[in-house]
């Protein structure tokens, strides 16, 4: 059976698969070792393979059909076909995330430098910031909990002029806690209002 022999191919070659065209190493007809897969949606994976899946280290380029170019690029670790472990991604808008991934999502410790000059270093879960330090280009800094991209829960906010707030944040703003000045003056915040 000639067909059965072809599926057992070992060596380097180029084959078309339902998801795209693969050029690289095979063991018994399975993608194994190093190879490049050009997906039918024009995404490209260049890296290590094991048992037919992206596994080990590699670079994944995401194709943007609107801009007609590869806009976002991930470099890092893969496990069973998904981003898993340590990796870095540069997005089309020039945001850059370096940190841990789990099941294709930013999860664990990571640092993101945003194109607007902000920088967040902290804990991520399912692509969302959970808690950590957000630095702003104007010198302000927040250290605390974040929900849905806003300061929410316990935290501290330091203004570049030396004033700082410690307490509970709600919807991105100080809600309940104390405002301290460099001179040592203390003002109480209750339900978002200074007392």
Image (cartoon, rainbow, N blue to C red):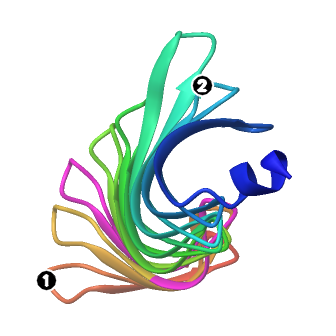
Mark toward the viewer: 2 or 1: 2
Please tell me whether residue 139 belongs to the stretch shown in magenta. Answer: yes
Q: How crowded is mark 2: few (under 14 residues within 10 Å), some or many (20 or more)?
A: some
Residue 9 in picture, x, y percent from top left: 61, 56
Please tell me whether residue 124 belongs to the stretch shown in magenta. Answer: no
Residue at the far right in the pictured view: 1
Image quarter for residue 148?
bottom right
| 111 or 135, nearer to the observer | 111
Q: What element carries label 2?
A: loop
Disc with the residue nearer the chain's start (2 vs 1): 2
- Residue beneath the point at 56% across and 26% down: 63
Residue 62 in picture, x, y percent from top left: 54, 35
- Residue beneath the point at 13% across and 83% down: 183
Q: Residues within 10 Å of mark 1 (few under 14, many from 20)?
A: few
Query: CB of mark 2 within 8 Å of CB of mark 1?
Result: no
Residue 94 in picture, x, y percent from top left: 34, 35
| 95 or 103, nearer to the observer | 103
Real-space CA distance between mark 2 and mark 1, rounded to the nearest whole angstrom = 59 Å
> Total label count?
2
Whether 92 is drawn above or below 49: the answer is above
- Residue beneath the point at 57% across and 33% down: 43
Residue 54 in picture, x, y percent from top left: 56, 63
Residue at the spot of label 2: 42
Image quarter for residue 27?
bottom right
Q: What stretch is highlighted in magenta?
A: 129-155
- Residue 137 in sight from this viewpoint: yes
Image side of residue 180 versus residue 17, left or right: left
Identify the disc placed on residue 183. Answer: 1
The quadrant in which the C terminus is found is bottom right
Image side of residue 40 versus residue 112, left or right: right
């Amino acid at each position: 059976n000639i067909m059965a022999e072809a599926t057992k191919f070992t060596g380097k070659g180029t084959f078309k698969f339902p998801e795209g065209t693969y050029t690289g190493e095979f063991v018994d007809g399975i993608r194994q070792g190093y190879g490049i897969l050009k997906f039918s949606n024009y995404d490209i994976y260049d890296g290590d393979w094991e048992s037919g899946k992206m596994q080990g280290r590699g670079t994944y380029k995401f194709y943007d059909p609107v801009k007609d170019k590869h806009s976002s690029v991930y470099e890092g670790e893969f496990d069973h076909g998904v981003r898993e472990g340590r990796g870095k991604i540069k997005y089309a808008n020039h945001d850059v995330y370096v940190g841990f991934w789990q099941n294709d999502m930013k999860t664990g410790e990571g640092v993101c430098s945003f194109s607007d000059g902000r920088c967040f270093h902290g804990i991520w879960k399912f692509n969302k910031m959970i808690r950590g330090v957000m630095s702003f280009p104007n010198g302000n800094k927040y250290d605390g909990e974040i929900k849905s991209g806003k300061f929410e829960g316990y935290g501290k906010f330091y203004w570049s002029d030396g004033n700082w707030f410690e307490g509970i944040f709600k919807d991105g703003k100080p809600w309940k806690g104390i405002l301290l000045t460099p001179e040592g003056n203390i003002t109480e915040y209750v339900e978002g209002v200074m007392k």
